[in-house]
Amino acid sequence: MAETPITKLMKQQERIRNIAIAAHIDHGKTTFSDNLLAGAGMLSHETAGKQRFLDFHADETERGITIDSASVSMIHTVKGKDYLINLIDTPGHVDFGGDVTRAMRAVDGCIILTCAVEGVMPQTETVVRQALKELVKPVLFINKVDRLIKEVKLTPEAMQKKFISIIDHVNQLIENIAPEGYKEKWKVGVGEGSVAFGSAFHNWALSFSYMKEKNITFKDVIDAYQNNNHKELAKKAPLHEVVLAMSVEHHPNPVVAQKYRIPKIWHGDLDSELGKSLTNCDQKGTPVFVPIKIVVDKHAGEVACGRLFSGTLKQGDEVYMNLAKRKTRIQQVSVYKGAQRFVVDEVSAGNIVGVVGLRDVFAGETVSKSEIEPFEAIKHIFEPVVTKSIEATKAADLPKLVEVLKQIGKEDPSIRIEINDQTGESLMSGMGELHLEIIENRIKSEKGLDVKTSAPIVVYRETITKEGPSVEGRSPNKHNSFYMMVEPLEDNVYEAIKEGAVPEGRVKKRSQAVADVFTKLGWIGDDVRNIRDVYKGNVFMDETRGEVHIGEVIEMVLDAFEMVIDQGPLAREPCTKMKVSLMDIRLHEDAIHRGPAQVYPAVREAIRGSMQKANSTLLEPLQIHLIEMPDNFLGTVTKLVGGKRGQMINVTQEGTIAAMEAKIPVAEMIGWSNDLRSATEGRGSSSIKDQLFEQIPTNLRDEIIRRIRERKGLSENQ
């Protein structure tokens, strides 16, 4: 294939910028991306901002929201030089936050978009947190400035004041969330040129440097609107020119970014040949590709879109999938242009690309030439807390449903799919009602499968409130004994696991990365050395001394531990915040008498036994919501929150708008958006700020356990 301008630039790493757009829902991200595409000549300037080019799913167009992240590569000229901009547009609704987290793995810079009228919202905070966690450098774009002029009718001074308060809020977030060394360095500022403002709907933008260069003032902007002449403004200061000049100047190219990002997201040996190849983003080095999104293309099959961190990939290359532990051959490599994918001869390090041929791949896999230390797992900020059971309307469609659900699980890894082969029941867990509703509609419309779902089910967690004794679990053949005990995990360790500071997974002996983190958290000597597994917010310790055969059974013991964590003793719900220790073992001399069939039941029985004596209890998921409404509805909303077992945390008022922070159990949130709409005559809105688990009220506990066990068909003693 002949070289195109894009493939030429793909090799010039200093001219590449990998960026994402991230914001709160309805702050105008997709309209904003349209403008950037129009600037690159992919859309007409007339339709930019109205076409929503990157929302190419029917349900996105219909609902007017972005659900999937979409990527596009385009060329932009800044000061006479061509740059390749690989852009990912991400969703703003919290139910699709998983897409934002995954997009951040592939990019080095992000444009935080806020609405000039609404300012920084809860989901803005979440996306900033997601970006900084992956060491992605932010710049700020304040959108919808036209509303400040036309609706709020602000003077130039009042507008500047409003901008300063938004910039201060964003910088406060950066200071609170950014890792050490980046708190000051990455703050955004008008003078430095890392802040721009404008209107994506009217296609114009300005930054301090651009205003100086073109001699434009705030007053010119206000005049343009008063004389209904904003089209002239769009010609004088086109949005794409201003924003991409800001990105080229303030966002790092992949070579610069990987020097500090790789040590954060890859825990292998940085001094090895592979380590150097990754840190230097070496196009001649070992190929390493991390997919962040799987799209099923009806012609090509599964396309993995992701970032190539080092090396070069071409059609026919044999690669190794490190998590799936198998080899496969690449059938095609390609670059993106919105919904279209263009096949190219080869792709090189530092780019966001599409790869076909990685059979059964999933987001977050590490693809390389031979076996290597995989990249850190992509950690989602919120966990799925609402579940529905789903079945095919026609029994004959069951095999197709299983196939479709596996596909859905790949396309959206923040949806959890469980398929029970024995009962044929399939469960789908997501971030909230809307998330599951969208997936259900897509199964019907895009996959052409008629399905019916149950009412939403809430996923609880099991834990303990005190230390349990050491309990013996004996194997069915009575030849092996395992002595296990459980105790609550310290708050700071649990928080560190949740935030991703502690890498999850089985711990290889003497893992320095794990030892360092736990030492910082206050653990000492033997405790640190005895850690064998960090799994879903729980830690497993091997406290045995001098046991000869421990090496032969430890993997089976960890399997059994993970089984109990996935299904606890009270109601078969996942367990959390526990430290489980293997205190002692008695093993049969002969390996044939200590296989999985003997080890699994014994270990499970011992852990469950200790949990029962450690006051095991249920935790329920709660969400902290920010509810906004006209102040005359405050009383009605307070009553609504109270009726849902909710607690009011804080209320603030600005003008006639009131904002309430409230903590509400997810079990009471079913139908929440409709209830809020009717309580506020359609004028209230709510967005999730945080998610946490708390002990269930004692008076409800037994009844909830009974209902869950009944639903799962568990008998009294199971």
Image (cartoon, rainbow, N blue to C red):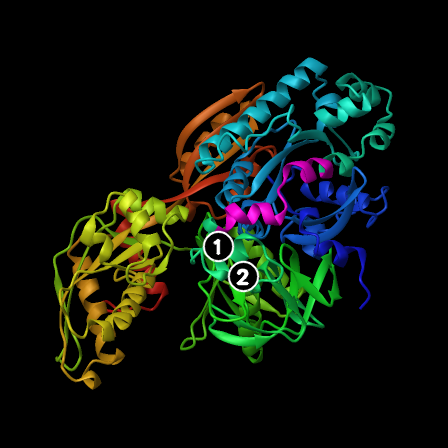
Residue under the image location 49 percent in, 75 percent down? 326
The x and y percentages for residue 179 are 45, 38
The quarter holding residue 643 reads top left
Q: Are marks 1 and 2 in contact (CB under 8 Å)?
A: yes
Q: x, y (%) of residue 362? A: 53, 65
- Of labels 1 and 2, earlier in sequence is 2
Secondary structure found at label 1 = loop
**Does the stretch in magenta take in 245?**
yes
Residue highlighted by disc 1: 378
The residue stretch that appears in magenta: 244-262
The C terminus, quarter of image = bottom left
Q: Is residue 341 left or right of residue 646?
A: right
Q: Is residue 269 shown to the viewer in this render?
A: yes
SS of the residue under disc 2 = loop
Q: Amino acid at mark 2?
A: Ala
Where's residue 219, x and y in %?
A: 78, 16
Crowd around label 1: few <14 · some 14–19 · many ≥20 (10 Å): some
**Does residue 30 appear to the left or right of 44 in the view shown?**
left
According to the picture, the residue beneath numbered tag 2 turns out to be 363
For this view, does 240 lie left or right of residue 486? Answer: right
Residue 549 or residue 399, whichever sits in front: 549
Whether residue 455 is in magenta: the answer is no
At x 43%, y 58%, the residue is 268
Residue 655's spot in the image, x, y percent? Answer: 58, 18
Quadrant location of residue 138?
top right
| Type of amino acid under label 1 | Ile
Query: Is residue 717 among what the camera can see?
Result: no
305 or 57: which is nearer to us?
Answer: 305
Viewer-side residue, 148 vs 429:
148
Q: Quadrant of the N terminus?
A: bottom right
